[in-house]
């Protein structure tokens, strides 16, 4: 049975945790450049990826999450909460996504899906959503809108009908159109509380806190979880903005303060970045681990954007590069040579993992792994923040993703391993490349395949 322990394999003692809705929060769906999401990706990869948990909490089912995964340059989450908090999945050490069966059993208590469905059918204003969104503990509808008064009457009637029938269910209204009827114990906030309780019991509650982010009514529960900090993105729907404004109104007994709830000036992922900086979650000054991940992120972008020649600026004399085609090159000889990437389009680095090298019997070996090409994120970062020594050799593994046209190219995901020397680990330019090895991941080994398998097996 999967538990939060499965998600902790890459980060046993998380420093921080970020929980975000996806559509119109993490992802600015109408922006095909994904400028703000790319800004977040870079900030997260550099400052958080080695010691923090990334959680996506979406109203989408696993099926519709797969669609968004293909459409947007999302990073790979440690935990995926789907279907408005009625399903929880953990990324396991082998990269697969497994459901939390304990959560499912908890939601089963008192839930009569057939009876809820029969009662909801009495309201012609509720049009069922597509079949993939009708889940074990969730029924979803689109409200055929009329006047605000009439719409509220439908919702109130549904809530009262459920209560009168003694059905353990709750109604969530969001985005001005979506109506979800959930098992009473479900919801984005309840799912997060369940996960945080597991972290607490495991002695792994993030000491630097939890930030939640949302844009609509089904996110309100996230902000009500005790102890979290929250970001309401600037493009939020009226129902969430009204709730947040009231929560910040001390004159009426509001429970939030600017130190715990931020109304962002930027939309979507731009607002999330804004809040991360405002709340002080980004370590300043940056630690050597963050500087190293920044070096690797820059390296990855140079690899993928037809700027291979510039790799020499980051490398020591004699540094070598094994390309995806198997060519062994001297990096210094690559000046002016294009990268092997299919296109110089949208690219990003994901799943950075740092490990030190140790000397054994005159040979340099990777600590905690059998080979430098171990899957990125498959083991905990062994070098803690601030522990990198001058002259130390480190292995960094990461994945390099790209778009082909306007969608994710999962056929050319590159698994990369680099050997880096920490010349001056406390300086932004204090790392030098010694060796870069690139390989193309098998399609069935990518996160895309794992999410597709999840969608195919979950109901």
Image (cartoon, rainbow, N blue to C red):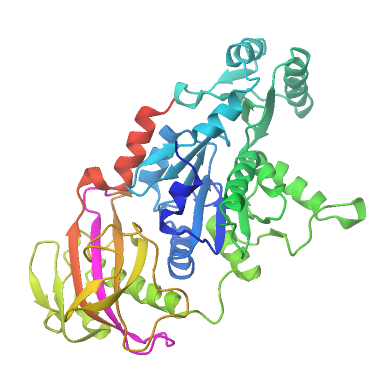
Stretch of the chain drawn in magenta: 409-431
Q: Does residue 139 lie above or below 357 as drawn? A: above
Q: 253 above or below 221? A: below
- The residue lying toward the viewer, choosing from 188 and 34, is 188
* Figure quadrant of the C terminus: top left
Let me know if residue 419 is in the magenta part: yes
Specify the farthest residue to the left.
Answer: 327
- Using the image, determine if residue 376 lies above or below residue 138: below
Nearest to the observer: residue 281 or residue 247? 281
Which quarter of the image is occupied by the N terminus?
A: top left
Judged left or right of residue 95, residue 413 is: left
Residue 268 in the image, given as x and y percentages of width and height: 56, 54
Q: Position of residue 236 (x, y in %)?
A: 65, 48
Q: Nearer the viewer, residue 211 or 249?
A: 211
State the residue lying farthest toward the front. 361
In the displayed structure, 202 sits above or below 290; it is: above
In this orientation, does residue 326 appear?
yes
């Amino acid at each position: 049975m999967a538990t939060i322990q499965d998600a902790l394999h890459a980060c046993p003692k998380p420093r921080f945790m970020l929980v975000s809705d996806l559509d119109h929060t993490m992802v600015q769906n109408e922006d095909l450049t994904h400028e703000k999401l790319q800004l977040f990706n870079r900030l997260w990869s550099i400052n958080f990826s080695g010691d923090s948990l990334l959680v996506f909490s979406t109203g989408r089912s696993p099926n519709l999450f797969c669609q968004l995964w293909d459409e947007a340059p999302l990073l790979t989450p440690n935990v995926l909460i789907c279907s408005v908090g009625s399903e929880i999945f953990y990324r396991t050490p082998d990269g697969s996504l497994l459901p939390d069966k304990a959560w499912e059993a908890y939601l089963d208590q008192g839930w009569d899906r057939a009876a809820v469905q029969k009662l909801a059918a009495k309201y012609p204003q509720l049009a069922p959503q597509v079949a993939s969104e009708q889940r074990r503990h969730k029924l979803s509808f689109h409200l055929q809108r009329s006047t605000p008064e009439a719409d509220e009457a439908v919702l109130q009637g549904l809530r009262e009908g459920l209560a009168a029938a003694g059905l353990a269910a709750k109604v969530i209204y969001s985005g001005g159109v979506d109506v979800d009827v959930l098992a009473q114990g479900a919801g984005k906030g309840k799912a997060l509380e369940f996960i945080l309780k597991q972290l607490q019991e495991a002695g792994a509650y993030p000491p630097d806190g939890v930030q939640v982010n949302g844009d609509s009514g089904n996110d309100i529960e996230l902000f009500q979880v005790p102890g979290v900090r929250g970001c309401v993105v600037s493009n939020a729907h009226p129902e969430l903005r009204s709730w947040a404004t009231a929560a910040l109104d001390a004159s009426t007994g509001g429970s939030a303060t600017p130190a715990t709830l931020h109304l962002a000036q930027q939309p979507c992922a731009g607002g999330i970045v804004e809040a991360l900086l405002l709340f002080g979650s980004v370590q300043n000054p940056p630690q050597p681990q963050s500087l190293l991940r920044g070096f690797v992120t820059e390296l990855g972008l140079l690899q993928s954007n037809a700027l291979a020649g510039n790799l020499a600026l980051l490398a020591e004399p004699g540094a070598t590069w094994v390309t995806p085609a198997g060519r062994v090159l001297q990096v210094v000889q690559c000046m002016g040579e294009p990268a092997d990437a299919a296109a110089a389009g949208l690219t990003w680095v994901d799943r950075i993992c740092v490990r030190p090298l140790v000397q054994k019997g005159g040979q340099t070996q990777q600590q905690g792994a059998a080979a430098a090409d171990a899957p990125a994120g498959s083991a905990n970062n062994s070098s803690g923040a601030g522990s990198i020594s001058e002259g130390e050799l480190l292995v960094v593994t990461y994945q390099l993703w790209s778009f082909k046209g306007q969608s994710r190219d999962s056929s050319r995901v590159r698994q990369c391993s680099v050997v880096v020397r920490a010349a001056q680990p406390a300086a932004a330019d204090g790392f030098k490349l010694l060796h870069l090895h690139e390989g193309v991941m098998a399609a069935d080994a990518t996160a895309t395949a794992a999410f597709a398998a999840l969608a195919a097996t979950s109901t």
